Amino acid sequence: MSTEIPLYVALDLDSDTETLELAEALSGFVGGFKIGPRLVLRYGPELIQKVSKKGKVFLDMKYFDIPNTMVSAVRSSFEAGASLVTVHALSGKEALSQLALLERELSAKRPFRILSVTMLTSFNADNLPKALSHRSIEENVEDLATMSFFSGLRGLVCSPLEVSKLRQKFPQSYLVTPGIRRSQDQLGDQKRVMGPQKALSLGASALVVGRPIVEAADPVQAAKEFYEEIKDFKTE
Ligand code: C5P
């Protein structure tokens, strides 16, 4: 058990300079930085390397493709410097099983996790795509989590509202939850939200927080406040 800070800041920004400055300023208060296509397509994989010097990189590209393509994409992400990489659980058992083997191979070299995304936290019962709408969000999440877990992936991305159930069902899982808001934070497009302490106490392994920190008048101060709230929680 290490004592990593269970908080990843989503650096949803457009400028590499701003990203690196913010990563530098926040590095003592967070466990790592989530970046995705918005930055990587603009500045290339070099930015992953640069951010990885400030903290762990959580590369959120949410891969969803045929198994072979997903395996290659995740391997390239690892080689670029990512420590966590997201894939869509909906890509199915075959892809997820191959990814679980890859995770085992890569994590022998350095800490590395593949996180399977269940349902986006911007979905609710009213905007769920028709193909998935014959079942509730909770049922979809549980099915996708079960498939991921039995394919060999312990890492899952879920809404904080699903954490408690998933923690009970899969005690060994590594549950990452976006959709974190304190009472004073704006919701933005997030629909299923929870406060940081509550999410961790219900069993989240790590939190992803974007706008409440990045768009705060003083992002460093906001990150410190989150850190103060969660510093007593340990994660593996
Ligand atoms: O700004 P906010 O705190 O809502 O940022 C949450 C981050 O987590 C965003 O980068 C969003 O893309 C990401 N995310 C999410 N829901 C998921 C997976 C990732 O909100 N299921």
Image (tube, grey):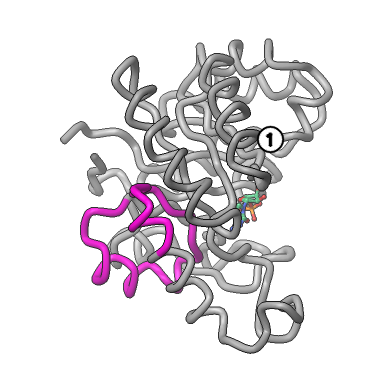
The image shows residue 152 at horizontal and vertical percentages of 34, 48
**Under 8 Å from ligand 1: the CB of mark 1?**
yes
Question: Residue 206, how many percent across, how many down?
Answer: 39, 48
x and y, in percent, of residue 120 in the image = 63, 63
Residue at image position (67%, 64%) is 186
User: Can residue 219 be seen in the rendering of this structure?
Assistant: no
Q: Which residues are magenta?
A: 147-173
Question: Residue shown at 35%/66% (left/top)?
Answer: 198
Residue 148 appearing in the image: yes
Q: Which residue is mark 1?
A: 36
Q: Quadrant of the N terminus?
A: top left
Q: Quadrant of residue 200?
A: bottom left
- Residue drawn at x 34%, y 37% as measured from the top left: 5
Q: Nearer the viewer, residue 2 or 77?
A: 77
Please report the residue visible at 58 percent of the width from the left and 65 percent of the height from the top: 119
Left or right for 215, reference 108: right
Looking at this view, is 61 or 211 the one in front?
Answer: 61
Instruction: Specify the amino acid type for callout 1.
Output: Gly
